[in-house]
Amino acid sequence: MSLKVYRSKRNFSATPEPKGEQRESGSSRGLLYIIQKHQATALHYDFRLEWQGVLLSWAVPKGPSLDPSVKRLAMQTEDHPLEYGGFEGVIPEPGYGAGTVMLWDRGTWKPEDPNVAKSLRSGELKFSLFGKKLRGSWVLVRTKNGYGSAAGKPAWLLIKHRDQFASQSDVLTAEPRSVKSKRLLAEIAEKGHGNVAKAAKGDPPGGGPKS
Ligand code: MN
C-alpha cells in the first residue's frame, strides 16, 4: 500500500486535498470507511476502506445500491491517505479530479476474514459497514476481466448482501446530503468558489429531501 500514485497525480500547491502521511492503522477506533460523492468530469461515488495505513479506493459510477439484486461497477483506483477521509470541498481546475467532493457517508468497516490481503488477491472481499447511510453486510467481487482492462484499473462489483439493512429504496436520492455538513454538492461548490452549475448536476432536482 503506497501513496506514490496518489501524490504523482496531484499538485499540492494547487489543490486543498491532503498530501497524506503514512500512519499506523488498527487502532481501537476501528477501521475507517467513507464514501465521497464526487462531481468531476462525471459524477461518481468514491468508496474507501482503511487498510494498512491508507484508504483502499474504488470509484463507483452509479453509487451503491441497498438492493442485493443490483451489482454496481467499482473501478479500483489509487490508495488515498487516511486524512482524505475528512476531505470535503472543491478541487480546482485543471487539477486531477477537478470538481466538487462531498463526504457522503462515514463510519467504520470490518472484514469478514481478517486476512484482507488474501481476500484482495482472491478477488472477493466480504465485509460489514457501520456508516450513517450504509450498514450491514456487503461484498466486493473482482470481475473476470478485472485485470488488464483498458484503463489499467481492476474492475470490481459492489453488492449488498441480504440482511435487515437490504432495501429496494434508493438511498442515493433519499439521502443526497453530506454526512459532515448536511450540504448539497452545489452548496459545497458555492462556498469553495467552484463550478456551482456543474456541481448541481450531481444533486437531485430541487435539492431532494431536507435533512
Ligand atoms: Mn473521485
Image (spheres, rainbow, N blue to C red):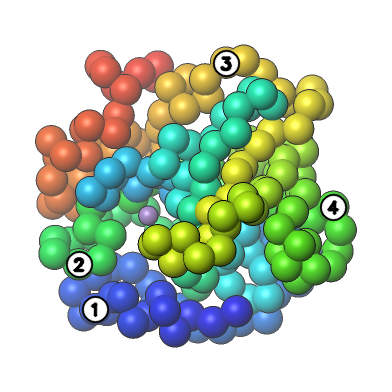
The amino acid beneath tag 4 is Glu
Whether label 2 touches label 3, CB < 8 Å:
no
Sequence-first tag of 1 and 4: 1
Residue 62 sits in quarter = top left
At 62% from the left and 50% from the top, the residue drawn is 143
Q: In this view, does 76 lie above or below 62?
A: below
Q: Is residue 97 visible?
A: yes
The mark nearer the N terminus, 1 or 3, is 1
For residue 11, the mark is 1
Whether label 4 lies within 8 Å of ligand 1 gets the answer no
* Helix, strand or loop under label 1: loop
Distance in Å between CA atoms under marks 4 and 2: 37 Å
Name the residue at 41% across, 32% down. 177
Element at badge 2?
A: loop
57 relative to 164 in the view: left or right = left
Give the image location of residue 144, x and y in percent: 63, 52
Q: Circle 3 sits on which residue?
A: 169
